[in-house]
Image (spheres, helix red, strand yellow):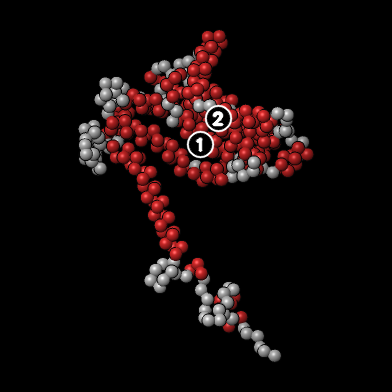
Amino acid sequence: MAEKLPVNMVSTDLLRGNFPAATGPSQDPAAAPDSPLGPPRYTRRRILSHALLLIASLLALVPFLWLLDTSFKTESSATQYPPALIPAPFRWQNYVNLFSERQYHMLLWARNSLTIAVLVVLGTTISSAFVAYGFAKIRFRGRGILFALMLSTMMIPFPVTMVSMFVIFKWLGDYTGIAWLGTFRPLWVPYWFGSAFSIFLLRQFFITIPEELSEAARIDGCSELGIFFRIILPLARPALSVVALFAFLSVWNDFLGPLVYLQHSHQFTLALGLDAFQSQLGGSQWNLLMAASVLVILPVVILFFIAQRTFIEGIATTGIKG
């Protein structure tokens, strides 16, 4: 009877499942090089794909780098031809002038933008969550038709309804005694009635939550509002974060809405205030305009990097089920 080999004498390749061929030792096909002088084929493909992605990323950053470079130039060097890549002299005073010159009210415009953005984010998130819960978890007659009708409103851009909305707000101001035109109300009140895209996004996420959780809560005597606040909303934090981020971006960059409804310079938002840097006579201070643009997009960039993980998680886990 043959003796058994000790474990320490068994080949490591045999333990890993790599059995030698009859003609010699085997090699992993994925690790086999194309030639004795070259790297593996999959390594070359990986290097090439990373190089293409890096080049595409640098091309996408060129406008932002040009914006940042111009914001540190003097007024004359910002318009010279051929343009200089490095500011000479390097002028930090452009950012100081944004807050020191009287014709620019950056702090006031930032406060107006932030006030509208907070109200829009709260209104969009709360109202859209309520409507999305009804479409996802409550069965009623005509639910599919109403959902399709709601989705159809996503195809109507704001310029199409701009005139009719203006007439409605003017009528409300004339017959209710509450001023709407020339105030912030038209910019944030409509968002408290839901957003079609946000409702769709949240509805797709709510569908992925197991129905057994809601059934167990109903057996314990929990109401629909209790299920909504105690079960659905805590589980939907990633999707709610995505809705809040999209709502903030849309209102922070909105130019047409404030242009239609606001009437005084002290009510301007940052997007509308950037227009004040362009002179009516053609002598725009491009260095100050670029510096102001950097300050406008900086909160958006910071917010994205802070909420990047939650944002990606919310996008990845939304719409898994139809």
Q: In which quarter of the image is residue 269?
A: top left
How far across and how far down the image is residue 143, in percent? 69, 30
Q: How crowded is mark 2: few (under 14 residues within 10 Å), some or many (20 or more)?
A: few
**Left or right of 233, for residue 35:** left
Q: Which residue lies furthest to the bottom in this view?
A: 1
Q: State how far apart marks 2 and 1 are (Cα).
A: 18 Å
**Left or right of 198, for residue 257:** left
In the rendered image, which quarter contains the N terminus?
bottom right
In-front residue for pair 16/225:
16
Instruction: Name the residue type under label 2.
Output: Met
How far across and how far down the image is residue 32, in percent? 47, 70
**Left or right of 145, for residue 293:** left
Residue position marked by numbered label 2 in the rendering: 154
Question: What secondary structure is found at the residue carrying circle 2?
Answer: helix
* Above or below, 60 relative to 261: below
Name which of mark 2 and mark 1 comes first in the sequence. Answer: 2
* Above or below, 304 relative to 3: above
Query: Residue drawn 42% across and 26% down?
Result: 255
Instruction: Name the residue type under label 1.
Output: Leu
How far across and how far down the image is residue 118, in percent? 50, 29
How far across and how far down the image is residue 300, in percent? 43, 37
Q: Which of the numbered marks, if any, corresponds to residue 245? A: 1
Query: Residue drawn 27% across and 24% down?
Result: 282
Q: In which quarter of the image is residue 291?
A: top left
